[in-house]
Image (cartoon, helix red, strand yellow):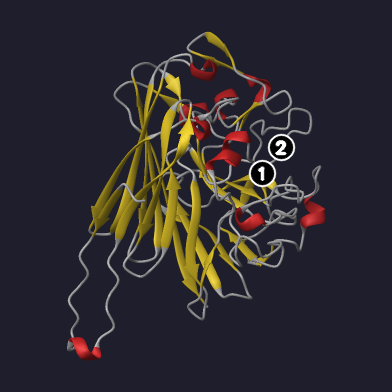
Amino acid sequence: MCALAIAGCASSPATPPSESVPTPRATITATPWGTADGKPVTLYTLTNSRGLVLKVATYGGIITELDVPDRAGKLADVVLGFDRLEPYLKGSPYFGAIIGRVANRIQGAHFELAGKQYTLAANNGQNSLHGGNKGWDKVVWEAKPEMRAEGPTLRLTYRSRDGEEGYPETVEAVNAYTLSNANELVIGMSATTDQLTVVSMAHHTYWNLAGQASGTILDQELEIDASHYTPIDPTTQTPNGAIALVAGTPFDFRIAKPIGKDLLAAGGSPLGFDGNWALDGDPHALRKAVRVKDPKSGRVLTLSGDQPGLQFYSGNYLDGTVRGKGGASYPQYGGFCIETQKFPNAINVPAWSAEVKLEPGQSYGSRMVFAFSTE
């Protein structure tokens, strides 16, 4: 069934073969997975030398599966999603996808750039969300599998043309997934343009460290390295430039606490967390941003990123009607998203807008490192 298979070399054992346990080889395989927009879609399976398994579709660059071990060594799939392509085509809450051209919300589905006015699709109330009606999560990317020293890599590329979803100028985008042999998922995003435009990419996997069919994430313990957050204007439903201290608010995750502890106090409709934190440290340096632990399984996820902000979303809009892998019903709070990013609505906030403007000769870049361990 596989159309492609690439294998890496395992290290030679230090002990005699009769006394050693064979070291798994890192591999990449490819399987046809249907069509979208008349184009073939491929599902790639990356396996590192320690047995972790990552599956990625060329449609939307979607991570459909990621198997990681618990404290007893038992593997479980810790990302929400579907078994087949068709449910993604019908519509999903951005499960596992690459987000672009601009992630998160743009107030009023409108912005000004170099004196010109641009109108986008208002696909989230009055605002534009995650690139519009057909963002980068709904296109077929070109794929190039590579076996690197650090682990198997899938390099995805997409050309977003001038005028697509109302955005100006052409952008060449790259998204590389590496499943490192150190049990890290490394995501590298980059983009270039031929003329002045706006770019802000993100990655939108829904995580549940207990396993994708295991109920809610409310008991999983979250720590965010952020002393400030960007409050949402209740009228526009976007940040408006204000930056506030997390101290004394439900948004204070500087000391790890269960996600459900302050859920009611967080407010919202539906209730829960769905906002942007201003991460501590150099806003453009790779640094620890988040740590999440599932006390039951012992799985720990540590996210490092090189962006100024972090979107944390507690799965508020999941309601049990979405049937995922294996027929699992995803309840409210059945998964969480952690996305390092530029601040939402940055193009409409003068103090933030330079972060999302991209000119010829410049290169947009974003790096996320999801490290998996156990306790």
Residue 275: give its label. 1
Label 1, residues with CA under 10 Å away: few <14, some 14-19, many ≥20: many
Specify whether residue 347 is in view. Answer: yes
Residue at point 35% right, 66% down?
182
User: Identity of the amino acid at label 2?
Assistant: Ile
In the displayed structure, does residue 39 sit left or right of residue 85? left
Q: Residue furthest top?
A: 116
To which residue does mark 2 refer?
A: 232
Give percent across and percent down for residue 184. 40, 61
- Secondary structure under tag 1 reads strand
Label 2 Cα crowd, 10 Å radius (few <14 / some 14-19 / many 20+): some
For this view, does 340 lie left or right of residue 193? right
Compared with residue 185, is residue 12 higher up or lower down, i.e. above or below?
below
| Of callouts 2 and 1, the N-terminal one | 2
**Residue drawn at x 30%, y 71% as measured from the top left:** 24
Task: Look at the numbered discs 2 and 1 and tell me whether their residues touch, using CB distance below 8 Å.
Answer: yes
**How far across and down, in percent of the image, does residue 362 sit?**
32, 27
Instruction: Answer above or below: position of 219 versus 159.
Output: below
